[in-house]
Image (spheres, rainbow, N blue to C red):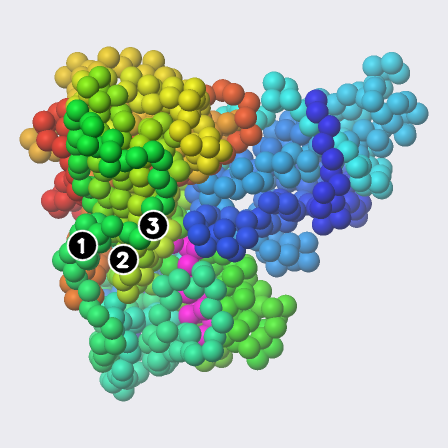
Amino acid sequence: MANFNLNINGKSQQVDVDPTTPILWVLRDHLKLVGTKYGCGVAQCGACTIHLGDSAVRSCQLPISTVGDQEITTIEGLSENGDHPVQQAWIEEDVYQCGYCQAGQIMNASAFLKSNSNPTDAEIETAMNGNICRCGTYTRIKKAIKKAAASENA
Amino acid sequence: MKLVKTTYNRRSFLRSSALAGGGMMLGFSWLASCKPTPEQLKSIPKEWFDINGFLKIADNGMVTIMSPNPEIGQNVKTAMPMIVAEELDVDWDDVIVEQAPLNTDIFTRQLAGGSQSIRQGWEGLRMAGATARQMLITAAAAAWQVPANEITTKAGVLSHEGSNKTAGYGEMASAAAGVEIPEEVPLKEATEFTIIGTDRKNVDGPKIVTGQPMFGLDIQEDGMLTAMIVHPPAFGMTYKSMDVESVKAMPGIKDVFPIEVYPEGVEKQWSDGGGIATLVAVVGESTWQCMQAKKALKVEWETTSKLESSADHEEALTRLLNSKPKEAARRDGDVPKAFKNAAKVIERTYSAPFLAHNTMEPMNFYAHVTAEEAKLKGPIQTPEFLEKTLASRLEMPLEKIDIMMTRMGGGFGRRLYGHFGVEAAVISKKMQAPIKLVYTREDDMTQGTYRPSYKVRYKAGLDENGKLIAWHVRGVGTNDDLVFENRFPAGAVDNYLAEKHMLESNVTTGAWRAPRSNFIAGAEQAFIDEVAELAGKDPIEFRLELFDRAINDPVGDPETNDYDPKRYAGVLRLVKEKAGWTGGKNGNSARGVASYYCHNSYVAQVLDLTMEGDTPTIDKVWCAVDCGIVINPLSARNQIEGGIIDGIGHATYSQMTFTDGKPDQENFDTYNLIRNNQAPKEIETFFVENGIDPTGLGEPSLPPVIGALANALYKATGQRYYHQPFISERQVVG
Ligand code: FES
Ligand code: FES
């Protein structure tokens, strides 16, 4: 066990955990931030996607000891009032079915749009290929990302 | 308007009371009259539910419709209140859909559904809304001293033209609560609907996009421990012993012990499905600590029945497929003679592997069992059955057991089998503490209740004019007999024989989205495509000729035929028109077509694809659906799209195989699920408008798309695809 100071959603948080603990479980078990989801634990499904600085990362693969004071953003902190353009586009397109994968999809999509504000369909597919949606909402995810890109560019 | 009696089940169906602060509350059973029996469930398990809810009209006119909770992703939480609001005649903007508070006196049972929920809830929900509306009218009639039948309603306002009086529902709500529940209420005609049939967004959307806790896995309770299980590594093995000492000392670990989930004498329900009798439990403070202990733990298992491999299943299924069952499931005409006289005969065999459900949220359950009571909470589709098993296992009366429902991160049939709830309860009892049982992805995938593996052989005979004169289908499956003998083309062919067999296996199997149909539809529709080609006919025209036959001159008693050929032909004609079908090509794309009937709904699809090397790109799927009245087209299209992507994905990429009883796939690095770039670029859905009562939507789009895909692949490659998964190579992702 060791003490860590984390910077999560703009707040400083202290936890005392085993240094190998992935951020996914720190968030879920210790900080009660359960919006970030567990789907596979082996970097295959993207359900656990968070932002580390500006990049989307898989929190199931991110031991707490490697994070330092880098800024972590989770779905709960993506926007103040749930009104990030990607969140809004998701609502407008009524993307979700069960909803379980969607926090990961949204976190990945929002980081992707920061690096590519006007993506092609093929670029969206490549960027989103690591996020499984078992309910099959892929066509809506693509539409919503295009909508979010358009609204941000407008 | 038409009048319907509310008297059936009236007492249990409706209850009226006044709200403390003014207003009216009407309690009703969402599905009072139409719960399937356990026997029906057992033969073809369907997702179902039995729930109680209420609507509340506040004195300011706001209407609250309580949705009694569980949601698998099929969006009933929006669609069911829409039906109530329609008959109540309120503005949807004045409706608040609330999650039912768990565990109160009002809700005796809360449970989630699937393709059957709207179909079974339709009438009851309409009646609840219409009854409340009628009571408001009665209250207004008394207040205004005018005849009730002269009062009209619109968007939450009562009006009486003659006296020029109007009042909002809120103003009459308190008085309405005291009105006697009517014996008879008018229901709207479909043409009068203003909410049903319009796009309404998922009421939980804002919570989903902000990551609010909704799922079983999100449960956090004071003093709660995390529990995990270790199950036998192979089907055919059972627990023998273990070395706990090294693990017990690991950080955060509270206890490690074997659990008797189902000791001898426990009365199991069908829903206990693939539950394993003895497991090992690892209980600790946090998930990560339990995962580490689980890995370090050394457990010894012993072999107690045959360790089956996929090669064994393959061989046994083939052997069964080659043997004649004692009895035919259905026989019309003289099949051997017809084949002898046929100008052309064709025979083909199709197969598909086991599949895991792989809900994105792995199995989990919260339990707190004390000497006095058991409180459980989690994602399950069959709590009523879980409760019965718990009563037997915990030796506790039913009324001391309380099961609450959470939103489900996917179901697809997996959460019908609630052994994980029993496991959670047994662990909690031993620990004398509240625990949350969490399956790792590997636990979830390797202790599945899989879609059975199947084989089917079709043989067809054509006369010299290319007319279908003989049909023989023989199907086999692991723990399942696959063939629906009264489905198409039964009734459309003079000489027809359907046969089926079952292979017993210790690999646990169960309902998986669109049971049986999820394989046999694709096989049948690919075969028909090949038969049409042999007959020299367009595949759509060939099918339509068969439907004509079933409409005009059905073979056998038309009552036994498990489909309506007019509606079947209707979706095929609709998709033909919408896709501009002229044959197997559309510009550079290869096209395939298929149609199927299951879960009381009809679907026809045209699929366009292009090949890049060995990889298909699905350019577009056109989908025509006849599911009667569509409540919420926006979410209906979402369900249809999901089924299409699910069907394409599993038929193309997914499989579960076994070596000596051990699942070869354990996580998404070896089990392929369809990815974003493999999904169709576009899906367009068209609904037949016919005013017929609504039927299932969650499943019917999945089965036929596999046939449309196989047929398009043939047009693109010149190869027929008989065996799933069509393309099994690992696509490198992640
Ligand atoms: S849980 Fe991290 S990628 Fe699946
Ligand atoms: S919405 Fe269910 S897994 Fe994506």
The chain ID associated with circle 1 is B
Name of the residue lying farthest toward the bottom? B245
Q: Mark 1 highlights which residue? A: B319
Pick the front one: A91 or B587: B587
Mark 1, ligand 2, within 8 Å: the answer is no
The verdict on residue B415 being magenta is: yes
Q: Is tag 1's residue or tag 3's residue first in the polypeptide sequence?
A: 1
Q: Which residues are magenta?
A: B414-426
Q: Position of residue B246 (x, y in %)?
A: 24, 84
Amino acid residing under circle 3: Glu
- Quarter of the image with the N terminus of chain B is top right
Residue at (34%, 19%) from the top-left corner? B544
Residue B293 visible in the picture: no
Residue position marked by numbered label 3 in the rendering = B327
Left or right: where B197 falls relative to B719: right
Q: Which residue is mark 2?
A: B503
Task: Tell me which residue sits at (31%, 25%) in the image.
Answer: B605
- Mark 1 vs mark 3: in front: 3
Left/right of residue B540 with respect to residue B82 in the rendered view: left
Numbered disc in front, either 3 or 2: 3
Q: Nearer the viewer, mark 2 or mark 1?
A: 1
- Residue, x 53% and y 73% (percent of image)? B392
Q: CA distance from mark 2 to mark 1?
A: 10 Å
**Front in this rendered view, residue B299 or B657:** B657
Share a chain, discs 3 and 2?
yes
Q: Locate residue B287, reporting x and y percent.
A: 34, 67
Is residue B190 at least partly visible in the picture? yes
Mark 1 to mark 3: distance in Å?
Answer: 17 Å
